[in-house]
Image (tube, rainbow, N blue to C red):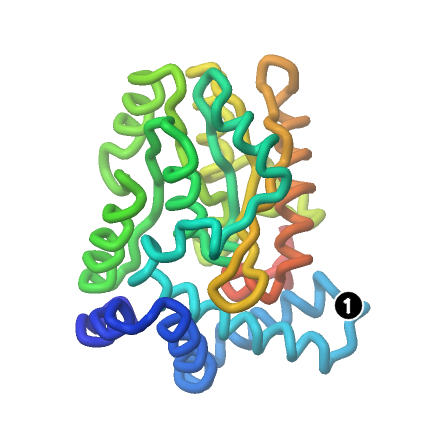
């Protein structure tokens, strides 16, 4: 969808709920049959994570996953129309706002659940904190260019590639209440290393970077995610901030792992990385 300018323009022209539905339909009917390897990998991982579920229920979860993937891609064209109370509610909204209004830099940690781009847009719209998003672009140049254009329109600023580390540190030290939005389940070396799901893995990737940054700039961690409730409607779930001044790196990693790892299982029908990781491999 992102690599097709006509389709992207069409999704923008359509009402947001219709565009979201169309994206889900295209993903289920066209993308899924063509991506058999990803579908099979997700099926194998789900069997490991939820062995107690009947096979028919796991298949239903996988079907809903493809719908969510398509809806999320289609909603990229309409994120600005979805960042409002009619489409996004917040668990304990007053408590969440108090966290955003608080002092010190904030590292917002999440996974590819529901619509992760809408989550980035929502946190930006919910606070006066200067925000920065970090992401790895797709390999296809046209898709990467379209994605960068879409994200910069609602994320404010998105950073990737060479010089990202310097840009991130400059951002976090330029304002005492800066925010950095990080997705922890990035794919590296054909594997997803977080959440751990019982695997004996040290901090690595984005989580390792976040742990080092937090102590350098005196930041707190905010684990959170945005789950789809029905169609283009969502709810923000969040964990009380984790403070490196009060907790060790191991304790912080365990808390983030438990919270977001559980969310990945509960919302397996919305978790993108289920088809990117391979839990059948040994640690």
Structural crowding at the residue carrying mark 1, measured as other residues with C-alpha within 10 Å and reported as few (<14), some (14–19) or many (≥20): few
Under tag 1, what secondary structure?
loop
Considering depth in this image, is 72 or 278 the residue closer to the camera?
Answer: 72
Q: Is residue 183 above or below residue 104?
A: below
What residue is disc 1 on?
51
Whole-percent x and y of residue 62? Answer: 59, 74
Classify the position of the N terminus by image quarter.
bottom left
Whole-percent x and y of residue 230? Answer: 56, 66
Considering depth in this image, is 169 or 202 the residue closer to the camera?
Answer: 169
Residue 276 visible here: yes
- The reply, left or right, for residue 57 in relation to residue 15 is right
Residue at point 28% right, 34% down?
Answer: 164
Q: Is residue 37 above or below residue 191?
A: below
- The reply, left or right, for residue 147 in relation to residue 49 is left
Task: Give the quarter of the image for residue 277.
Answer: bottom right
Whole-percent x and y of residue 263? Answer: 64, 51
Whole-percent x and y of residue 157? Answer: 26, 39
Residue at point 58% right, 38% down?
Answer: 93
């Amino acid at each position: 969808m992102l690599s097709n300018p006509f389709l992207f323009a069409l999704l923008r022209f359509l009402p947001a709920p219709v565009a979201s539905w169309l994206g889900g339909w295209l993903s289920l009917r066209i993308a899924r049959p063509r991506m058999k390897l990803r579908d099979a990998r997700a099926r194998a991982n789900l069997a490991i994570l939820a062995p107690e579920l009947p096979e028919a229920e796991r298949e239903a979860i996988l079907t809903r996953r493809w719908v969510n993937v398509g809806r999320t891609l289609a909603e990229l064209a309409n994120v600005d129309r979805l960042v409002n109370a009619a489409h996004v509610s917040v668990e304990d909204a007053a408590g969440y706002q108090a966290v955003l209004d608080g002092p010190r830099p904030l590292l917002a940690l999440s996974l590819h659940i529901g619509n992760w781009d809408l989550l980035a847009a929502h946190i930006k719209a919910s606070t006066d904190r200067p925000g920065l998003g970090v992401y790895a672009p797709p390999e296809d140049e046209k898709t990467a260019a379209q994605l960068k254009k879409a994200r910069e329109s609602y994320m404010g600023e998105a950073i990737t590639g060479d010089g990202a580390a310097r840009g991130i540190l400059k951002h976090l030290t330029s304002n005492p209440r800066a925010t950095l939005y990080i997705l922890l389940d990035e794919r590296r070396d054909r594997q997803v290393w977080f959440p751990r799901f019982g695997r004996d893995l040290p901090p690595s990737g984005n989580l390792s970077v976040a742990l080092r940054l937090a102590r350098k700039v005196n930041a707190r961690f905010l684990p959170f995610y945005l789950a789809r409730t029905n169609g283009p409607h969502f709810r923000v779930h969040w964990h009380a901030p984790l403070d490196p001044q009060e907790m060790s790196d191991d304790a912080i990693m365990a808390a983030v792992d438990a919270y977001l790892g559980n969310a990945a299982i509960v919302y397996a029908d919305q978790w993108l990385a289920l088809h990117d990781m391979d839990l059948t491999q040994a640690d």
